[in-house]
Image (cartoon, rainbow, N blue to C red):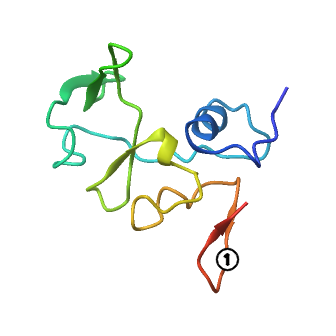
Amino acid sequence: TLIDCDYVYGETYVYLSCTGMCQNSTCPLSRLVNSTSCPNSFPDRIYTLANNSYLTFVKRSEQQKQYHNNFFLCKNDKICLPYDKVCNLVDDCGDKSDEENCTNHFQCKDSKQYID
């Protein structure tokens, strides 16, 4: 059963849309986070091979004591955001790339504000 994700935001929206569980939604994750992405972020990154095809990085979560790579790469290639900052009605990247492929809201033409 597909879910209506029109009022789902952040990490939950990313998970549901990227696993094909949302009706009429596309996954906003279109760019690979590679080893050189976001050079001034995450100084404690650990490099690893992803899909046997490219080098990426993971970061250790102190709370969960696990490694994760749940980062969204902004179009400016300088900022990597955690998934909870993607499709959340806020331009966290500064270039709107974290909101542009989201189907759970739209941007007003005049005010440039995101509304659901």
Q: Residue at x 26, y 32 (%)?
A: 56
x and y, in percent, of residue 6 in the image: 77, 49
x and y, in percent, of residue 20 in the image: 69, 32
Q: Is residue 37 above or below residue 78?
A: above
Pointer 1 local density, CA inside 10 Å: few below 14, some 14–19, many at least 20: few
Quadrant of the image occupied by residue 67: top left
- Which residue is denoted by mark 1 in the rendering? 108
Number of numbered markers: 1
Q: Is residue 67 above or below residue 69?
A: above
Q: Residue at x 32, y 13 (%)?
A: 65
Quadrant of the image occupied by residue 1: top right
Observer-nearest residue: 83 or 47? 83
Observer-nearest residue: 90 or 26? 90
Q: Looking at this rendering, what residue extends furthest in the right direction? A: 1
The C terminus sits in image quarter: bottom right
- The secondary element bearing badge 1 is classed as loop
